[in-house]
Amino acid sequence: MKIAYFGEQTASKETELGWEPSLTFFTVILQFTVGAYVTLLAVNYFLPTLKGFISMPLSTLWVAALIGLLSSVVHGKNPRSFLFIPTSIKSSYLSREVVLLGLFTLLLILYPIRNLLLPEQTTNAIHDYISLLTGVLGVAAMVGIYMVPSRPCWRHLYTPFSFMLPAATSGPIFALLTLGAASNQIIQTTPLGIVTAVLVASLSTIDVLAYSRYRDYLAAQGSETRSCFAKLETKRTAYGLKITLRLLTATLCITSLPLSSILSVRAWLSYSAICLALILTAELVSRGLFYLSVGAPVGEERFLKVAKGLLR
């Protein structure tokens, strides 16, 4: 739906799949980055035994955020249109999303600079809290874009749940992996490791059930939602891949707890990296299926009408 905003001249014809990879990468990567940041910030303030190792992970997060933003620019077709985004921040969730996440990225870039200028482990609560606020509100604005009456396929509780998943699953795993690498020790049995394993396994399993209920909703509602469901039915291989990745992720996360006692540090880091790769792959597949629903056949006039509705 953002196609019309960044380049309305291209909105008259949807892509074959109804979604663009750049938009998928943008949303997943930024949500992952926010989740990783929230986790590392929690470690900084509540887990003193690991606090001394967060400088490296915090100093690299801006790279992921910047890649996500650049993906958004690619999706927009015309980068110059970004100059006009702040003018509608009061009325447009889309403008709030881009402004807030752009500010969040700039604030992340300050972390490596802060580490160079200030003594190690120096706490700057104002910087931390403003970064936290902009990141969380940016993801909330993402959800607001799609929870609109003009799109019943997306106006469902599964939408905010699915947009929260990358932050709540891949973010903590990234923090666990990078903190383990920075400290050169297995931290799976620490409070952070245990909570992460249980949280990711639980949410991955819940998503399998929630997505099934969401598909039932699409199949049972009006003509537009049934059209979305029919479109999704053409991609059952992707649906099966999503479910397989979720269940595999849940299994690996739970088994990581007993396995951590027999694995070497290098083997555990590799195991954790595999878990992170599986989660991110599952999120990309899941988000691709989400955007696929916009590919339901609609005329040019109605497509532009819906697109404009997202900006109100």
Image (spheres, rainbow, N blue to C red):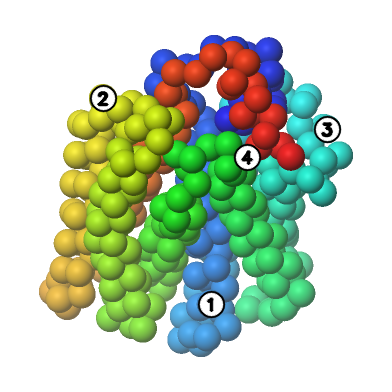
The image quadrant that residue 253 belongs to is bottom left
Residue 99 higher or lower than 300, as above or below: below
According to the image, label 2 marks what residue? 234
Q: CA distance from mark 3 to mark 4?
A: 16 Å
Of callouts 3 and 2, which one flags the residue occurring earlier in the amino acid sequence?
3
Task: Measuring from the top left, give residue 27's x and y in whole percent.
Answer: 53, 43
Q: How many marks?
A: 4
Q: CA distance from mark 3 to mark 1?
A: 35 Å
Along the horizontal axis of the image, is 226 left or right of 115?
left
Q: Is residue 194 visible?
A: yes
Q: CA distance from mark 3 to mark 2?
A: 38 Å
What number is the disc on residue 22?
A: none
According to the image, label 3 marks what residue? 84
Residue 84 higher or lower than 165, as above or below: above
Of callouts 4 and 1, which one flags the residue occurring earlier in the amino acid sequence?
1
Dot 2: element? loop
Which residue is painted at 25% across and 56% down in the image? 209
